[in-house]
Amino acid sequence: MGPIGDPNNTVLTRLIQTIKEISTLPECKNTSKIMYSNLMRRVKLLSPLFEELTERDDELGVAEIQALESLSVALDSAKELLQWVNETSKLYQVVHRDIVSLKFLKTTEQIEEALSKMPYNQLDLSEEVREQIELVHAQFRRLKWKGECRDPQLEMDMAIMQEEAEPDAAVLRRLSDNLHLKTIDDLRKESRAFHEMVVTTGADLGNSFETLTYLFKKLNDYLLSVIPEKDTCDVEKETIKHRSPVIPDDFRCPISLELMKDPVIVSTGQTYERSCIQKWLDAGHKTCPKTQQTLLHTALTPNYVLKSLITLWCENNGVELPKKQGNCRNKRSGSSSLDCDQAAINELLRKLKHGNIEEQRAAAGELRLLAKRNADNRVCIAEAGAIPLLVELLSSPDSRAQEHAVTALLNLSIHETNKSIIVDAGAVSYIVEVLKYGSVEARENAAATLFSLSVVDENKVAIGAAGAIPALIDLLCEGTPRGKKDAATAIFNLSIYQGNKVRAVRAGIVPPLMGLLKDPGGGMVDEALAILAILASHPEGKIAIGQVEPIPILLEIIRTGSPRNRENAAAVLWSLCMGDARHLTVARKLGAGEVLRELSENGTDRAKRKAGSLLELLQRVESNSNQ
């Protein structure tokens, strides 16, 4: 074949580079390791084919180049899958091992199909290389039909973990070894990977979230029970005995500055004492107290790793873990009963049920204020049976009564138990109608209510199916600044569910988001970019974003934006450029290399990974253009 600069040699250079990159990937340390190792080993065995073709003097024909191009695409997919296995949550992979196996099967099919198109007779390969490639091809063909063998012991252990409340220690030990989660540090890294899936990437975990957190807690408890006491320095222990221990800053709640008992993670990644952050949210705040970033949702994720570390620290330092929640808890006002006027609430409900429209309007307004005031009122109002009556009032022809009713439901939904009561009362379709046709304030509060309800995963499906997303997009386009933010946070949270991504894209959300992105003065850049990042993970979202010429504004945000916005812009750019030479070429011409190199050095961890991957792709494009 011709020299390296020959255009016919470009595809071979890419194939050799891809195999080189796959060869440098680290060892897999989770339950996917057999599929991972087998795929990596078989791909590496293809290397002699490309090396021999590179050394030939004659040029490749069109059919040969097309076959090698197909194989290049397949091997790129293999590399992406292997990287994903290394980076994503180990617990997610073991719970969703069927999904992981299907990913490997699809990649196997893609490689096998590409090898089937290879015109071996025209390549004039040496006998040794021909035999090796045919052997590898036969292995891929066999796996295409049979798939990889499952580990029966793992299947049995997982069945026990999911069926028994207290699994045997031997099961936990085997699972810990299989997942390579053997130390608290391993669990801390797993916690970060798991949290990034839930919060940052918008992974759709469906009903598996509880299973994942249960497994995490069981493994955490097991490791704490087997950690030898010698792991803590004896000298340090002796020193601690003779002085009052200083509470590590990471163990203190940023709000109360007290030792945390029930640490939880908010959407920005910060950890707080549950009672403190809940009181902050109950007061109507929508920002992270520590960073002042807007909270994309109000879901609180238990930080089991930190909780266990705090427990271990308390035991080693002779500190008694707080038995009661800290100073952030709402205090009772001198009475042992709930701090609410039950008689007054009952009278308001009587008016809601039997009063005329003026009385209903006034009663709904009173309940709205009471529900906003404190958590006790939310419990009392719901237990008294107010929610079905307020839902009924959502269809009232009186706009003010309707506004009071939806806002009362919003305030009641802050209490976790009330969310399911509201949905079970059939409220979702009525709230969507208010979102479409209500007054300005009613539409805003309807959007906020849908966001609050969508924190519960199963509600995301019902809200999307009720037609909420097109109405939320309308509010995003034409609402007040507050209305736009309420709509954006609801859309973001709903789009965590895969089916709602498609609904949002087909409802035309991408052009309005790009408009918000290009208007920094509008104050919606953070929200618009967060939604684009989650939509870009879906094929239809990627196509729609690519059609609105997003790359110049994305690069500008990577240059000048906040750390979170730079990260999200890089994530969108990465999704667009993977497998799309057109977008890569545009990014290169606009100077993406310099911008991404800076991000790879100074961005967040996730931003650095995305920047590094994009730089690899850009280097390939640049290498090809110079040949």
Image: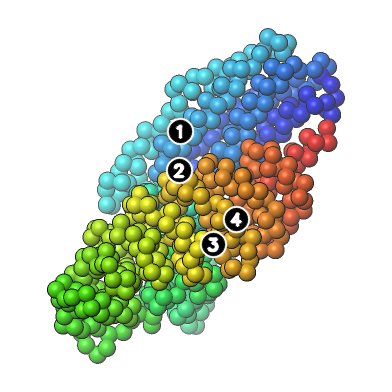
The location of residue 445, given as percent across then percent down, is: 39, 69
Return the disc, 3 or 2, that comes first in the chain's sequence.
2
**In 3D space, how far apart are the residues under numbered discs 3 and 4 (Cα atoms)?**
11 Å
Return the disc, 3 or 4, that comes first in the chain's sequence.
4
- Crowding around mark 4 (Cα neighbors within 10 Å: few <14, some 14 to 19, many 20+) is many
Which residue is labeled 3 in the image? 527
The amino acid at mark 2 is: Gln
Do labels 3 and 4 touch, CB within 8 Å? Answer: no
Quarter holding residue 435? bottom left
Q: Nearer the viewer, mark 3 or mark 2?
A: 3
Which residue is labeled 2 in the image? 93
Return the disc, 3 or 1, that comes first in the chain's sequence.
1
- Crowding around mark 1 (Cα neighbors within 10 Å: few <14, some 14 to 19, many 20+) is few
Which residue is labeled 4 in the image? 514
The amino acid at mark 1 is: Leu
Q: What element carries label 3?
A: helix
Return the disc, 2 or 1, that comes first in the chain's sequence.
2
Return the disc, 1 or 4, that comes first in the chain's sequence.
1
The amino acid at mark 3 is: Glu
Q: Is residue 570 left or right of residue 31?
A: right
Residue depicted at x 16% and y 72% = 353
Residue depicted at x 61% and y 44% = 547
Q: Which of 481 and 193 is in front in this view?
A: 481
Question: Can the viewer see residue 452 in this picture?
Answer: no
**In 3D space, how far apart are the residues under numbered discs 1 and 4 (Cα atoms)?**
35 Å
The amino acid at mark 4 is: Met
Where's the C terminus, which quadrant? top right
The location of residue 373, given as percent across then percent down, is: 33, 81
Numbered tag placed on residue 102 in the rendering: 1
